[in-house]
Structure formats: structure tokens, C-alpha cells
Image (cartoon, helix red, strand yellow):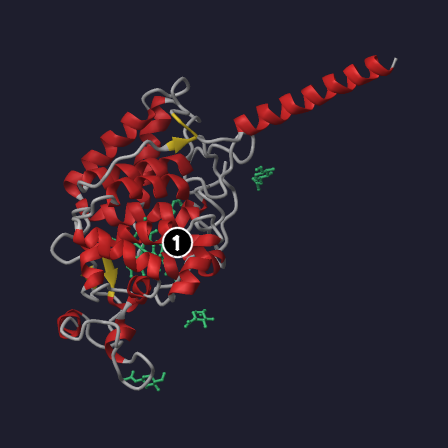
Amino acid sequence: MASSKLSSGLIFLQLVLLVFVFNSANAQLKVGFYKYTCPKAEAVVKEVIDQVMKVAPSLSGPLLRMHFHDCFVRGCDASVLLNSSTGQAEKDSPPNLSLRGFQIIDRVKAALEKECPGVVSCADIIAIVARDVTVATMGPTWEVETGRRDGNVSRVSEPLTNLPPFFANISQLIAQFRAKNLNVKDLVVLSGGHTIGTSHCSSFNNRLYNFTGKGDTDPTLDSEYIPHLKKKCKAGDQTTLVEMDPGSVRTFDNSYYTLLTKRRGLFQSDASLLDNSQTKAYIKLQSATGGSTFFKDFGVSMIKMGRVEVLTGKSGEIRKVCSKVN
Ligand code: HEM
Ligand SMILES: *[C@@H]1O[C@H](CO)[C@@H](O)[C@H](O)[C@H]1NC(C)=O
Ligand SMILES: *[C@@H]1O[C@H](CO)[C@@H](O)[C@H](O)[C@H]1NC(C)=O
Ligand SMILES: *[C@@H]1O[C@H](CO)[C@@H](O)[C@H](O)[C@H]1NC(C)=O
Ligand SMILES: *[C@@H]1O[C@H](CO)[C@@H](O)[C@H](O)[C@H]1NC(C)=O
Ligand SMILES: CC(=O)N[C@H]1CO[C@H](CO)[C@@H](O)[C@@H]1O
């Protein structure tokens, strides 16, 4: 009696375990998720991106950044792509101002819907595209985990509370990355994404003209660099675009870290990476060693960022059109 009770109890436990293991296996991202359901998925993305990079290489920056903005707000669920007829989506929030390339994601999605309708999520497209533009700018490659599903919520208020602002100090940056399960190393590594792309003057104008409200400049910015930046950005200029890593704006390399050692990081957030011993040591190392481990580290941290609060298994949906829920 006792033993049959025990064994039925054990069987029950095994069942529970099995269900648990099955569900959690289901709920994992993995490399090659579309191997059987859409074997050409990544090749299709790459083909479109390679074409785009030939005619519009300046989209590499915005397309890399899009993955960051997607993952930090409600997880990597393509909520960043949703349109709102009333201006209430993430897209409509101030930090998005420079987000571009939505039509490229739409183009990739259209190609994939032709290849295998209803299979590849918009969230996975963003993740694969981020890798492909990094490769296209001569940066590292990594194996993108896939299996994300798309969310159906996008709120205008959420980018402001989840994305660190350009004026963030080091403790705020560390805290906001930690909130997404990313550590101090991920912070300094992923900030290296600023090796490509451009910024609006509005993201650093305060450092040039009115840092503390007394018409002063940011003392942490190289004083010899300030006149050069002032030439590009007049006081109050919100719209002019400036290369963040002048001279190699379309090349993914370690020069971001070299700029930082010269106190020429463009944003206060970049500069603040010198205010922590761990991030400072990383910057010095990458600068001194020609980026010895940066490429490998970047792939590792991008994979980690790509796991933030993802929807998998039966959660969410596979959108048919990336800018709207099914
Ligand atoms: C650490 C916190 C971060 C802050 C505060 C930050 C802030 C910014 C700001 C203010 C801009 C310029 C926007 C504009 O005015 O046009 C920018 C651009 C950019 N960011 Fe970040 N960022 C951060 C992290 C990241 C991460 C993790 C990535 C990707 C791995 C990334 C990739 C980029 C890229 C590629 C651009 C250039 C976009 C373009 O060319 O249009 N950033 N970032
Ligand atoms: C969604 O908005 C983008 C601009 O943010 C626009 O280019 C696109 O046409 C819109 N898509 C739909 C389906 O309304
Ligand atoms: C960093 O920024 C946060 C949030 O704005 C602020 O509360 C904190 O006092 C700042 N820390 C330092 C050391 O300036
Ligand atoms: C600088 O900032 C202060 C305080 O916000 C403001 O009163 C002043 O008008 C600003 N000066 C300029 C030149 O924008
Ligand atoms: C949003 O997605 C969830 C599943 O993740 C679903 O239960 C819900 O009905 C969806 N809502 C809308 C408005 O599509
Ligand atoms: C691409 C996009 O939707 N940009 C919007 C970002 O948010 C501002 C408002 O802060 C809108 O004016 C832009 O159209």
C-alpha cells in the first residue's frame, strides 16, 4: 500500500517534472530555431541587408540601435515597431527620435513572408538584422539565438523609463542595465555600439553651451575637442547629425574606446564610463590592445541582451505585418 502510494506519487512527480522540462525547453531561445520551419530565414535576412547596406550604409547605426531599444522596453518583442494611430506607441516617445530603418524591417519581413508565411517573428528579425549590420560594418559576428515571439503592447511612456538617457551617470547606467539582467561588463561592451552611427546635436548640446545653467561647458569633455563640436552644432541646434566616432563612423572597430580615453566620448553616458574602475579598466585595455577582446565580448553581450524578457513558446504571436498586431 505504502509503496504503491509512493510509486504513484513518484510517477506524479515525474510527470510534473516532464511537463516542467518540456515547457522550459519550449521557452528557450536557441540557435537555429527556424532550421526546419524556415531553413533559409537567416539567408533571406542577410540578402536584404546586404542590398540595403550597398545603397544606404548609414542605416547600419539605426538598425543596430533598434535591437537595444526593442529589448530594453518590454523585452525583445518587436514592440518598438508597432504603429499607433493616436501617437501612443513606443515609436512616438522622445528617445526614438533618431530611430530609423523601420521600412527596412518591413522589407525583410515581406521577403520572409514570401519564403515561409507566418513563421519568423519580427522580434527575431530585429535581432538577426542587428548582427548582420554589425558584420556589414566589418564588426564581429555571432550566432543569433531565435525563437522570440512578438508582443502586442507598445506604450509611449515606456521608453523614457526603461532606456537610459544620454545624460545618465554611471550609477544610473549600471542600475538600468542591471534591471535588464545585464552587468557592468555588458554595459561597457554594448556601449561600444557607439563605434558606428550618428547623433543629433540635441543629445550632447548641453555639454557644449550650458552645462550647469551658467553658460559653461562639461569639464569632463576634452577642451580641445569642444570648439570642433561647436562648429558642427550651434547653440540650440536640435537637428544636425554628427558622427559619433569621427573618421570611422561606418566601421565597427575599437576606436570608440580610444576616443573615450581622450575624453572625447560624445554623450555624458559615454564619458561616465570612466567613472567606474571596472568600466575604466576595460576602456583602457581595449584602447591599448587594439580591441583585443572587444569583438568577442560584443557578440557575447549582444546574445545576452537578445534574451531580455523574451516571449517564447505559446506566448505572444508571429505578426504578419511588423507595424501592427495580427
Ligand atoms: C548605455 C546606454 C546608452 C545610451 C545612453 C545611448 C544613447 C544614445 C544616443 C543619445 C544616441 C544618439 C541619438 C540621436 O541623437 O540621434 C545613440 C545612438 C546610437 N546608439 Fe546608443 N545609447 C546607449 C546604449 C547603446 C547600445 C547598448 C547600443 C547597441 C548595442 C547602442 C547603439 C547605438 C547606435 C548604433 C547609435 C547610432 C544610431 C544612428 O546612427 O542613428 N547604444 N545612443
Ligand atoms: C507605420 O509607421 C511608419 C512610420 O513610423 C510608416 O512609415 C508606416 O507606413 C506605418 N505603417 C502602417 C502599416 O501604418
Ligand atoms: C546619478 O543620477 C541619479 C539619477 O539621476 C541621481 O539620483 C544620483 O544622485 C546621481 N549620482 C551621482 C553620483 O551623481
Ligand atoms: C542656460 O540655462 C539657464 C538655466 O536653465 C537658463 O536660464 C539660461 O537662459 C540658459 N542660457 C542659454 C544661453 O541658453
Ligand atoms: C495579446 O497577446 C496575448 C497573448 O500573448 C493574448 O492573450 C491577447 O489576447 C492579445 N491581445 C490583443 C489585443 O491582441
Ligand atoms: C519614427 C518615429 O515615429 N518618430 C517619432 C518619435 O517621437 C517623436 C515625438 O517625440 C515624433 O515626432 C516622431 O515622429
**Whole-percent x, y for residue 266 in the image:** 24, 64
Report the residue at 59% width, 27% height from top.
23
Position of 1 relative to 84 (above/below): above
> Label 1 amino acid?
Val
Residue 87 visible from this viewpoint = no
Residue 161 placement, left or right of 266? right
Depth check, front residue: 99 or 218 = 218
Position of 291 relative to 240 (above/below): above
| Residue 218: quarter of image | bottom left
**Whole-percent x, y for residue 30 in the image:** 43, 28
Report the residue at 24% width, 36% height from top.
49
| Residue 103: quarter of image | top left
Residue 114 visible from this viewpoint = yes
**Whole-percent x, y for residue 184 in the image:** 39, 53
Q: Quarter for ligand 6? A: bottom left
Name the residue at the right extreme.
1
The residue wearing badge 1 is: 184
| Residue 55: quarter of image | top left
**Whole-percent x, y for residue 288 in the image:** 17, 53
